[in-house]
Amino acid sequence: MRPLLLHYYITNRCNARCAFCDIWREIPKADAQSAHVLQNLTQARRAGCRFVDFTGGEPLLHPDLPLFLTEARRLGFVTSVTTNCMIFAQRAVELAGLVDLLHFSIDADDASLHNRIRGCDSYASVLAAIPAALANDLAPDLLFTYTNENIDSFSGVYKLGRENRLMVILDPVFSLDGKDIASRETHNKALAWSRKPGVYLNKAHLMLRRQGGNSPSRNYCRAASSTIVLLPDNRLALPCFHHATGFVPVNQSLPKSLLDPQRADAMRRQGAYPFCEGCHINCYFDPSYTASLSRLTFPSLVAKASYAFTKYLVYRRKLPVRIF
């Protein structure tokens, strides 16, 4: 199958110290070379990718992010960026109109809890980033990674979204060892919030967790075939970023790297490695749900349709919110 998503780690530098992420610990620090990024974008689009997610680290720390977004839009990509907002207000003008799916990370309606989870004083930056985004033709989603610790601090984030006509995304925290670290009670609270207008939760994520995550006998993972993962040092990571066991240097030829025997092996074994038992990493299962038909495909598509309806027909076109 042709890949759907280019997951591009353009830097491993970060100005936060999030409790549920370790990329800020990586050494040495590196930014992707701009010439590599531009060439890889062209070749990934030709390979079939329709979405590109510029990530990190903190992607706004890469000085050429606006250049990458401009080229991606020219090539016909749907663009995505997630930021902690620490420097967003300073760079908002450069990003004006270039990001289709912009996500602002906010993990509590209380500054002290949010800052403790993020390991930095970023709460005020998120609040300042919202008007800066709206003034520059950008409609950010508020991305709330929910845990047992913060699920009861969601109401204020929901209110913030409604006041600014912004979608709020409930994203369940994941672990790398296959164990769901969010309790059933926490998931049920998130599910209740998802019934509110303007809240997006991909219920396929919860269905996957309730059955114990991925397993070779119930293999939903298409990480290696649906997603191209590129690292700042211009290597392809296989089968995914979080469980990379193989790396293929791109060396100016992404199509050649995609034909490497290591990738063929990763596609054959995706979802069946020992570390795939119980896996539920959101960013790789999200494209997997639609890459192949399964019992999780329909719930995922319904959630996405609801998101698109609210964001683009209700909020962006200013239709009356009372239609819900």
Image: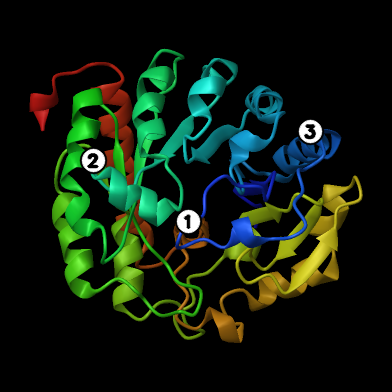
Quarter of the N terminus within the rendering: bottom right
Q: Which residue type carries mark 1?
A: Cys
Q: Is residue 24 above or below residue 128?
A: below
Describe residue 256's horizontal placement relative to residue 128 as left or right.
Answer: right
Q: Tag count in the figure?
A: 3
**Residue placed at 15% from the left, 48% from the top?**
195
Mark 1 burial class by Cα count in 10 Å: few <14, some 14-19, many 20+: some
Mark pair 2, 3: CA separation? 36 Å
Q: Which residue type carries mark 3?
A: Leu
Q: Which residue type carries mark 2?
A: Val
**Residue denoted by label 1:** 18
**Residue placed at 65% from the left, 24% from the top?**
66
Counting from the top left corner in percent of width and height, residue 114 is at 33, 49
| Figure quadrant of residue 65 | top right
Q: Nearer the viewer, residue 186 or 87?
A: 87
**Residue placed at 59% from the left, 48% from the top?**
4
Mark pair 2, 1: CA separation? 19 Å
Q: Check residue 157 in the rendering and tell me which mark sits there, or answer none.
A: 2
Q: Check residue 38 in the rendering and tell me which mark sits there, or answer none.
A: 3
Q: Is residue 28 above or below residue 95?
A: below
Mark pair 1, 3: CA separation? 29 Å
Q: Which of the two discs, 1 and 3, sits closer to the camera?
A: 1
